[in-house]
Image (cartoon, rainbow, N blue to C red):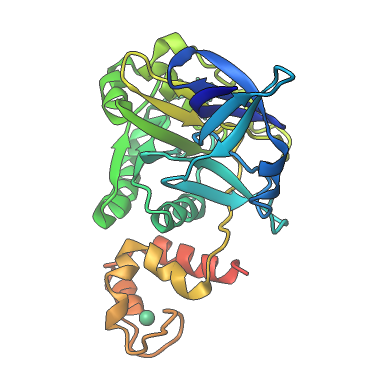
Amino acid sequence: MFLGQGTVVRSVGSFYRVLLKHSPDKPIECTLRGKIRLQNLKTTNPIAVGDKVLISRESTGEPVITEILPRTNYILRKATNLSKQEHILCANIDQLLLIITLSSPATTLGFIDRILVTAEAYHIPTRLIINKIDLIPEIFHEELKKYINIYESIGYDVYALSALDTNAQDTIRGILSNRISFLIGLSGSGKSTIINRAEPSLNLKVGSLSNFSNQGKHITTFAEMHQLPNLGGAVINAPGVREFSLTGFQKNEIGQWFPEIRSRMHQCKFSNCLHLNEPACAVKEAVQNQKIATSRYNSYVGMLQHND
Ligand code: GDP
Ligand code: ZN
């Protein structure tokens, strides 16, 4: 018996929690009907949070997902650093919010840039939230401005705030309302705190600061979608992220996912320029003239070296 169309809001092992369009208050725990499992062999998970699915009740009474509707977008990452397998982080999102902390924990520029490149490649609008600015001492405020400027000058919206501060509520609500947002950032960067600040009734569990540095490296991460009843829209939170590796990129395409490289690469002498040691390279020239941030260029070179 056909039950309806719904959205996958949680996936743990082979169980999927689905919110039906016509009864969003009663989530249904489903499994996958066997034959769907055969598709999508390359990814470790055939269905991701955010997926739109059709569900039916089997004659045994068990609710099952019978079909995955086409995705408007999705984000893939490597399942683990060493594996060739890929993991779908989420599907059908309106925006990606990259949560950054300069300390506790320190988010590296490489981590930020690998996520931004991935989001560019999947054409997902991305905003950056620098959280925990209350922990940044006055003497580092110039440093913070430089950081913000790197990304604003490329065209990203950057917000600097402290999720612990009640005054940040309006800003956070403005960012989250009426959209499906995917929050990504290191474990401990304050994703749950940010979501709670927007929608206190969700009351998500907040990790203690002492925890995140001690946790093992291989915790299972599973994303979960939370509806925002007062704001409209929903958030997908991906807890436990410690690293982010690129997957599925050709060396010669990575440059085009850096907006500031993309806008200059056609001025390079060689059309297949990788912007490493080639003569008359407009990208390297822009780095020398400080039109492209050295940190961004270094991230680019790092991605070429570690992409196989
Ligand atoms: P998540 O793992 O990204 O979801 O991070 P949590 O929301 O669980 O936050 C991790 C820790 O950082 C908790 O102890 C929070 O109270 C703390 N935290 C979150 N936002 C801020 C902030 O703006 N300033 C400070 N000082 N601590 C924060
Ligand atoms: Zn070049």
Is residue 224 among what the camera can see?
no
Q: Give how far across and how far down residue 229 sits, in percent.
A: 37, 14
Specify the quadrant of the image occupied by residue 59: top right
User: 114 above or below 289?
Assistant: above
Identified at 46% across, 66% down, the residue is 300
Out of 179 and 71, give the one closest to the viewer.
71
Relative to 152, 275 lies left or right:
right
User: 192 above or below 248?
Assistant: above
Identified at 37% across, 26% down, the residue is 162
Is residue 259 among what the camera can see?
yes
Out of 251 and 9, give the one closest to the viewer.
9
Q: Give how far across and how far down residue 134 sits, in percent.
A: 38, 27
Relative to 306, 82 lies left or right:
right
Identified at 41% across, 67% down, the residue is 297
Relative to 267, 8 lies left or right:
right
State the residue lying farthest toward the top: 201
- For the N terminus, the quadrant is top right
Q: Give how far across and how far down residue 88 sits, in percent.
A: 58, 45
Q: Give how far across and how far down residue 239 sits, in percent.
A: 58, 31
User: 48 above or below 273?
Assistant: above
Out of 125 and 138, give the one closest to the viewer.
125
